[in-house]
Image (cartoon, helix red, strand yellow):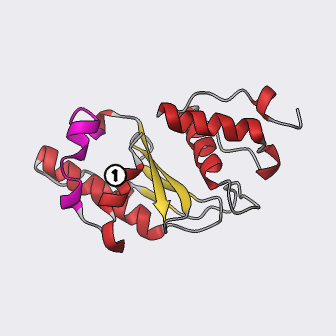
């Protein structure tokens, strides 16, 4: 999982800037992000909203998750440009089969929040389901104080532990 600082630097002043992050993977990921199956990128969008991007190297896809329904096209394009630039830097050639990558934005089936304050909880739950390779199958009604505390702990521990829905879901 990348830190939110990564995307702030990558998309500084609302435009893509690889030079701001060209050494990021060396420090965070041991130098080669292409050794990973997936990378999760939290996005602090507009200063008051959190979204998430999943980079799936095995599936050659980049998917944007927004609990308020935004499409995030510019963010997904920026991440794909980063992958291409990083590949060029590491291997001194273009990303093979770059035209086979899927850039997925604004899916209708992405769970949506119905309030103005649970976007961080949704981002943590998106990350948790991605790490388990299951679709995000939850809704606002599944969010309660237990899931908010779980999310806060996940952020403070800088990792996404599995959630025990038996204790967090008020409807089980």
Q: Secondary structure at mark 1?
A: helix
Q: Residue at x 67, y 36 (%)?
A: 149
Image-quadrant location for residue 135: top right
Q: Residue at x 67, y 45 (%)?
A: 136
Residue at which label 1 appears: 6
**44 or 106, which lies in front?**
44
Residue 26 inside the magenta-drawn segment: yes
State the residue in front, 58 or 22: 22
Relative horizontal placement of residue 165, taking residue 15 as reference (left or right): right
Q: In the picture, which quadrant includes the C terminus?
A: top right
Residue plotted at (25% across, 42% down): 25
Q: Is residue 159 visible?
A: no
Relative to 134, say whether 62 is above or below: below
Give the extent of the magenta segment.
18-33
Quarter the N terminus occupies: top left
Specify whether residue 153 is painted magenta.
Answer: no
Q: Is residue 148 left or right of residue 27?
A: right
User: What is the residue that sits farthest to the bottom in this orientation?
Assistant: 14
Dot 1: few (<14), some (14–19), or many (≥20) neighbours within 10 Å?
Answer: some
Spot occupied by residue 59 in the image (x, y as percentages of width and height)? 45, 44
What's the residue at 70%, 54% (across, down)?
111
Give above or below for 14 relative to 9.
below
**Residue 112's x, y, as percent?**
71, 58
128 w.r.t. 117: above or below = above
Q: Name the residue at the left extreme.
A: 92
Residue 28 rendering spot, x and y as whole percentages = 28, 37
Residue 114 placement (x, y as % from top left): 77, 61
Residue 72 visible within the image: yes
Furthest residue toward right: 171
Q: Classify residue 85 by image quadrant.
A: bottom left
92 or 169: which is nearer to us?
169
Q: Is residue 129 or residue 87 the one in the foreground? A: 129
């Amino acid at each position: 999982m990348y830190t939110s600082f990564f995307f702030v630097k990558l998309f500084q002043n609302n435009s893509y800037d690889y030079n701001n992050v060209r050494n990021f993977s060396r420090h965070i990921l041991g130098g080669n992000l292409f050794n990973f199956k997936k990378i999760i990128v939290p996005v602090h969008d507009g200063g008051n909203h959190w979204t998430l991007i999943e980079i799936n190297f095995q599936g050659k896809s980049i998917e944007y998750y927004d609990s308020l329904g935004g499409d995030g096209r510019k963010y997904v394009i920026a991440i794909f440009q980063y992958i291409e630039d990083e590949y060029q830097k590491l291997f001194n050639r273009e990303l093979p089969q770059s035209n086979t990558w899927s850039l997925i934005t604004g899916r209708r089936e992405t769970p949506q929040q119905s309030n103005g304050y649970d976007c961080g909880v949704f981002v943590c739950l998106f990350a948790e389901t991605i790490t388990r390779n299951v679709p995000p199958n939850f809704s606002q009604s599944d969010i309660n104080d237990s899931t908010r505390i779980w999310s806060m702990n996940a952020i403070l521990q800088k990792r996404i532990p599995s959630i025990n829905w038996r204790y967090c879901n008020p409807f089980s």
